[in-house]
Image (cartoon, rainbow, N blue to C red):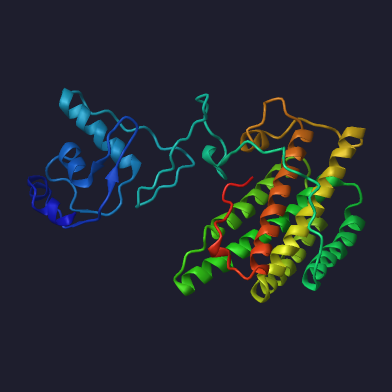
Amino acid sequence: MYSRIAGSAASRQLGVRLFSTWTFAGKGVPELSGAAWIRNNIPAGGARSWSTLAPGVVRDAEEEKSASGSGAARSEPPPPREDAVVSYWGVSPAKIVKEDGTEWKWKSFRPWETYAPDLSIDLKKHHVPSNLLDKMAYWTVKLLRYPTDLFFQRRYGCRAMMLETVAAVPGMVGGLLLHCKSLRRFEHSGGWIKALLEEAENERMHLMTFMEVSQPRWYERALVIAVQGVFFNAYMLGYLVSPKFAHRVVGYLEEEAIHSYTEFLKELDKGNIENVPAPAIAIDYWRLPPDSTLRDVVMVVRADEAHHRDVNHFASDIHYQGQQLKETPAPIGYH
């Protein structure tokens, strides 16, 4: 790339010293190589060293070219936003709009990360423990359920919010360990890194949703710090020792989550919990109708948990059959 630019008339005019390979393609603009874009957009005597081209630079160059070509006076640049971060690197967040043209207001996820949930999944599937390791995983989860039931009773909104702070841990830990293993052994992961991180992100979005419904108390926040710290390290150790055991534990945890959300729905149907309008973040994330309610949100969250159940039991089965996860393509996008 550098040799082609250095040999061109444009590069001799610019006095290019350093240049990294890049291309630019904007809306309605064909993809151009760096050299072609320079010839078309940058006047002589411009850049000497270019390594990063920000969208703002592209727009400024286009405006300058348009103004100089028409002979019009150069207009003053728009005033910077009050919350804009001024950076030497010229990185500028893109403005994203929804399909209806309104501005996308969520910073934690983008429109292409949303999806329509699959509510047809079988919620009653259960992996029957068939060996000692499975039974250990099953009874470990059952024992963990008793203190949870005792602490939260029938406060399902707060229960859901608090449990999601823990439910997002296994996917992140598994993805992290597989990521390190992939680097250490110079091998692919079969897509399982992305699948597990996708699961962790989905669980975190559950938390972001239920935060709009119920606010934690100070002692519940303290409990999260303690439980998350213990669970994170315990699960990491368990995954290092036996991935098939770790994934089986998560599979059974998700089965319990399905049960908890089913009880949540029963309380909503009885009128014991007010069926308030669905939070705006849930409507955008799951592409729900504008008039959706909390019951609709619980339905899609329960479906997500059923998909996580399937993925983790599947991962455990792969290990039980003497194979590595990398040998079987991961169910990426399996919501």
Please tell me which residue is depicted at 21% across the width and 41% down the height of the picture.
37
- Residue 215: x and y, percent? 78, 46
Residue ranking furthest to the front: 321
Q: Considering depth in this image, is 24 or 300 the residue closer to the camera?
A: 300
Relative to 8, 33 lies left or right: right
Q: Considering depth in this image, is 291 or 88 the residue closer to the camera?
A: 291
Classify the position of the N terminus by image quarter.
Answer: bottom left
Residue ranking furthest to the bottom: 241
- Residue 192: x and y, percent? 56, 59
- Residue 141: x and y, percent? 82, 63
The image quarter containing residue 298 is top right
- Residue 262: x and y, percent? 84, 43
Relative to 161, 7 lies left or right: left
Q: Is residue 22 above or below residue 132?
A: above
Please tell me which residue is depicted at 73% across the width and 63% down the height of the picture.
248
Please tell me which residue is depicted at 64% across the width and 74% down the height of the picture.
240
Q: Is residue 95 above or below residue 216?
A: above
Q: Considering depth in this image, is 27 or 106 the residue closer to the camera?
A: 27
Relative to 83, 75 lies left or right: left
The image shows a total of numbered marks equal to 0
Q: Is residue 261 above or below residue 196?
A: above
The image quarter containing residue 329 is bottom right
Classify the position of the C terminus by image quarter.
Answer: top right
Q: Considering depth in this image, is 112 or 17 the residue closer to the camera?
A: 112
Q: Is residue 100 above or below residue 154?
A: above
